Amino acid sequence: MNCREATRLMSEQQERELVLRERLPLKLHVMMCTGCRNFGQQMHTIRQIARTYAKNEDKDGSA
Amino acid sequence: MNKKLLSSVHGEAAPDKHPILTDPVFLTDLRKQMLKFATLQLSDGHLAEDAVQEALIGALKNANSFGGRAALKTWVFAILKNKIADVLRQKQRMVNVGSLLREDAEDEDFSALFDQKQFWHADERPSAWANPEAALHEGQFWHVFEACLDNLPEKQGRVFMMREFIELDSSEICVAVGITVSNLNVMLHRARIRLRECLENKWFLNEERAS
Ligand SMILES: [Zn+2]
């Protein structure tokens, strides 16, 4: 597995559950690759950021 | 503030008005934020205006059940998101399938990010983000986030927002914009890669900001 493929799977993981034959190679790759490990965490962070943004359009602290 | 709205709000909620509804500044601000949000989603000022209007009127009918502004706001935005989702579904029926979104996402060049073997270039490798939770509480962060969203190619930005802001699921988005699931996945992947890079460069690794 290469980084491009790993990032693709980590993005899709936000949409659906990966199957075993995707999950295992991904896990192996991520164990050895800091860049993709960080990328994986950032996928969760970005979702959290987006949800926070959408729920609370009040960023100026007026409420 | 829109006069039609003000009068309808005041008219319908007249007998036991929520104190918030007598505050025109709050209402004007709220409406402005909603409009911005809806315009971003619908890319059509008129449709956005209508959605906001309907959402506000609908929400304010029940405004008395809300104790505070934050709760009211959350409620109003929830209604607005539903309206937007409705409009998008209707729009799909009126628009030629695919004319809205036929981006050939497959061909985009990733060679700036990945080397020939499709591993990260050393200087493009994602870094660890220090304390992302804290960013959520900083006003400036949200300006950066908006700027990064604006930087996305239009179509990528729209499917990303449909997915993450309105929380439509994949099949709903595919129907609404006339693309296949694999198309959608490619677009979301690209949107997330770009957004990630932008947030990292403009916020998480931005040394000017840290000093
Ligand atoms: Zn990797």
Image (spheres, grey):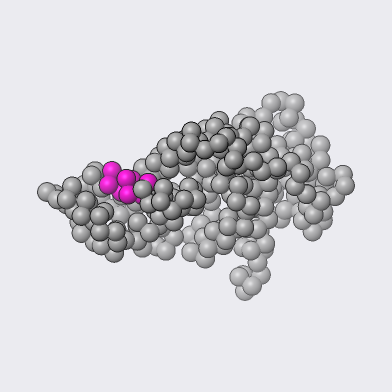
The residue that appears at 67% across and 29% down in the rendered structure is A18
Q: Number of labelled discs?
A: 0
Seen from this angle, which residue lies furthest top? A20
Q: Position of residue A26 (x, y in %)?
A: 75, 35
Is residue B39 among the parts visible in the rendering? yes
Quadrant where the C terminus of chain A lies? bottom left
Is residue B120 among the parts visible in the rendering? no
Magenta residues span B51-59
Q: Quadrant of residue B96?
A: top right
The residue that appears at 70% across and 36% down in the rendered structure is A9
Q: Position of residue A28 (x, y in %)?
A: 78, 36
Q: Position of residue B186 (x, y in %)?
A: 68, 39
The residue that appears at 42% across and 37% down in the rendered structure is B86
* Residue B71 painted magenta: no
Left or right of residue B76, residue B210 in this image = right
Seen from this angle, which residue lies furthest right? B116
Quadrant where the N terminus of chain A lies? top right
Left or right of residue A62, residue B183 in this image = right
The residue that appears at 43% across and 43% down in the rendered structure is B84
Q: Position of residue A6 (x, y in %)?
A: 75, 39
